[in-house]
Image (tube, rainbow, N blue to C red):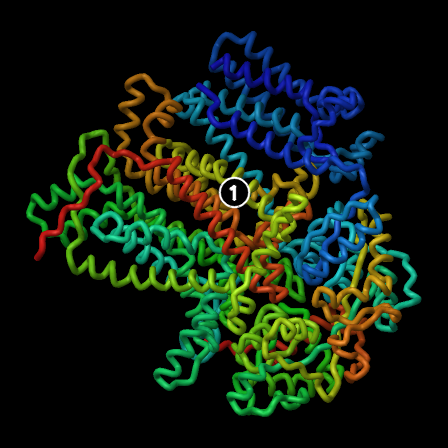
Amino acid sequence: MKKFGIVPLLALVASTSSFTIAASTTTNADELNLVCSAEQDWCDLMVAAFGAEHDDVDVLMVRKSTGETLAQIRAEAGNPKIDVWWGGTGDPHLIAAEEGLSQPSGVDTGELLGWAQNMSQISEGKTVGIYAGALGIAYNADILKKLNVEPPQCWADLEDPRFFGEIQVANPNSSGTAYTELATFVQLFGEDQAMVKLAAIGKNVNSYTKSGSAPSKAAARGETGVSIGFMHDMVNLATQGFPLKIVAPCEGTGYEVGAVSIINGAKNEDAAKKWVEFSLRADVQSRGPEVGSFQVPSNSNAKVAPESPDLASIKLIDYDFATYGSSETRKRLLARWDKEVGDPNPQ
Amino acid sequence: MKKLSLSWLMIGLVSFIFLPWHMTEDGFLDAAWIVDGLPSTGLFQMLAGQWWHLPALLTFIIGIVLQLTIPNPVVRAKATLLSSSIGLLLIAVQGLIIVRAGPRLFEMLLTGETIIAGQPGMGLGAGLVALSLLFVITTSIAQSGKGQGDAFVIGAIGLIVSLVGIFVFYPVMHILIQAFQVEGGYALGEFFPKFFSADIWGLSCLVGNHTCGVAINSLFLAVMTGAGTTFLGLSFALIFTRTNFRAKKLLRILTVLPIITPPFVIGLALILLFGRAGTVTEFVAELLNIEPGRWVYGFWGVYFAQLLSFTPIAFLVLIGVVQGVSPSMEEASQTLDADRWQTFRYVSLPLMRPGLANAFLLGFIESLADFGNPLVLGSGYSVLSTEIFFAIVGSVADPAKAAILAIALLTLTLSAFMAQRLWLGKKSYATITGKADSGQNASLNPVLRTICYATALPWAALTLVVYSMIIFGSFVKLWGYNHSFTWDHYIRAFGIDFASGRFSGVAWDSYFTTLTISSIAAPLTALVGLATAYLLVRQKFVGKNAFEFSTMLSFAIPGTVIGVSYIMAFNFPPIELTGTSIILIIVFVFRNMPVGVRGGIAAMSQLDKSLDEASITLGANSFTTVKRVILPLMGPAILAALTYSFVRAITSVSAVIFLVSAKHNMATSFIVGRVENGEFGLAIAYSAVLIITMLAAILILQLLVGARKLRRTDRVQQTVSA
């Protein structure tokens, strides 16, 4: 009649967990729980730079994608474990603001460029733009040369049968990148015409990937000839040595705005505010290119790296985040995409 | 039995009086209460105004009084059972109702300053109080004459049922209930049209050029994978036990490799080999002068990757079972003039049925829940696991759709589980008895041996190629383009600054966390899994089938669903675990426990029950029987459970992505971040280090657990040259 297993089990859990917890509670400094949705290296750089200035704040950072972060803060609503969410495309930040999952940070946005201030206005100050990345086309120079195909210059070129089976793009139902593309087409060509054009490009698409960054990676490796995605991702791949060439479409293009938000009910609100102020500073934003992040900074005084896609030379549309970020428009456009463009399943 | 009840009651009472009832901000087991002079024990909290802890105290006092006053054991047991059950229920109810923000139900009735202030999650004191009450209840059940009066068995059942209830059902319910959610409430009627929609179950791919529903896609893939992995696993197991193949050691390592690989690595390697610009594809295309294709994206690629990934699981389950088939029976068959084929077909194979069925079931379920391979290679072939993931984290979050798809997935699992039960039937598969058994296993007949070699060896060769590629990829600058040698990736990940003695590499933190958490989770998983298997095979109790299925539940649910449901369930009192390492350990234990259960069941069905009976007859109780008779014969199953749970804790991705926090980051979530960023070199170098770590761990485990001794000579009949 012994109590086999339970006592050692408890002892094991007790000893190990108290060890891990004891190890982490030795400091008395303020904590800041940060979720970073930008590239890992950039996250590390930001945390190190912040730590150098604020040695009274202990930054605990974890990197998660925007979709995962949004799902997590939704599930944690009411008792959030995250204080501040930095980086990642703006749509999920706007959704979080719309659902009341984030709170106004009250920072001064005076130095910021128009699109970043716009972001703050739409969300009533709950989320602020930190960088912009334009949508573009990338092609694998080796592959197109081998196939003897003229590289694309415009969105319209992608409808040409010479790219049959060579284009890869993400599915807007799962990827924010692809949704930005869909919204860009609608704003460029009008809703009906956009669907016609997307369907025409769809004839050349070999695969609608789930993830937004996958097409450009596939193009880099030669798994596909042409991809659609964000230019800064493409620049990053090209600087790594892949034969990837980047095209700013002649008709003009849309862009994403990366954002920072303070989570509603954050336990370390003061530290979170310090972080937001820090991340909007010109000298901080200028450091992205050090770690291969080539987005365009939102602070008008920040330096832009020479490799970064020059927003001045790209024909940017006046992207309407308020309309195309709302869940109503989103649902309608995606339903139309499903019906008129669809995913021609190759199976 | 009276003493046992009494001692549990005392433990509970002492915990209530002396241990902190709630967790603190610093965690579940903060030690500050000892030194800071602010007692937070249950008793103190109650006296300080939290009157809702009174039932706990009363339960113990009543329980102790009952033990000391009622002489009739059955009456005493029934009275204790009643009072303790009520006590436990009241503790659970107060925990669920009164959370951090005060009461969440009956706000009208529950007023007062202390109750509005709310309470944090339960801590050590509350945990021990609940545990001791649980054992008082199970002991009382045993005492009142149920379950042959075996307090150990009933206690174990009670504990496992409660754990599965708390850590599987309770969180999963949070998600599944959303399937019935409509705007502004819940409705049952909406569910059925959504559930039976053609998007999920459509069969139009059979007749035309259209796509099938996601569930049909998943089902087809899972059946193919289950059958394929079982077949391959059996071939490997037969080569090991029934042939004189020379390079068994090398083969053994190859069979383990895929299981210890973060899933996307296999997908990536397959793309680099068989993708349109892959090495093999380009070679074949040049040779045959054909256009390189994209066949690897879609069903075949995913199927291929899953076979590669899951064959080792089938092998781990089957090797124990194939070894266990009694040579005496095979010899008897041959004595009766059966040839080697007939012996295999009519004696050995039927005896392996539990192994085959369990291997198939695991392969089937693994395939259904697999997330990494369909994500990397799936392209247009949609399956449930990826659809569920994007229903939760996609550009339009639709938790209701995720829940409905999760229910579809569970339906498939349940069906497979039922089918397996039907196929196994009620036959006995016991082949390990106490009797002397000194024969030798029949070797395979030549045709069968050729088939085994022909399937297993090319497979092993492919595995070897894939892994050489991975090692190669970690040492070159840019895999696929720039093949100049470099140590850079390893230095970035695992650099050590010798001047300051600091671990300067970026991967060290997550590496140590991963190893710590996995080494804690693995023995717990094996313990819970094998204990459950023991109960399922050896004990009879009401609701056994439902119990068995419930242990499979967490395995069948995709990691994403588990991850999100764990946040929903364990971010608030009474059990608040998010952001700790405990939640990671728990998720691993309950997600991987089914492998321990399946392996344990397969191995235990072979142990003749007369062994237990002999032990009991000789005066041992069931605890001693487990320890002295069953456990020593379970070597391979224990090894499989330990290995598998250790490895899965290191390689699983989808469940932990939501549960990792800054303090407790895991290797896979780190690697996935790097892959998303396109830094394949670093990701692969990290994976290579993980693979080598796991390989070393497995070898050490193998040495520690040792081979079981069946008092048979492990030899295979010498092949007579035909």
Q: Is residue A42 visible?
A: yes
Residue B57: x %, y % from top left: 67, 19
Residue A208: x %, y % from top left: 57, 75
Depth check: give the residue in front, A138 or A345: A138
Q: Is residue A25 above or below residue B267?
A: above
- Give the side of residue B164 with respect to residue B120, left or right: left
Looking at this rendering, what residue extends furthest in the front direction? Answer: B499
Q: Residues within 10 Å of mark 1 (few under 14, many from 20)?
A: many
Question: Which residue does the image show at 65% across and 87% down from the upper left?
Answer: A197
Chain of the residue where label 1 is placed in the rendered structure:
B
Residue on which the image places disc 1:
B590
Q: Is residue B176 visible?
A: no
Residue B66: x %, y % from top left: 57, 12
Q: How many marks?
A: 1
- Give the side of residue B103 with respect to residue B392, left or right: right
- Give the side of residue B657 with respect to residue B149, left or right: right
Q: Is residue A317 above or below residue B11?
A: below
Three-letter code, disc 1 = Phe
Residue A144's quadrant in the figure? bottom right
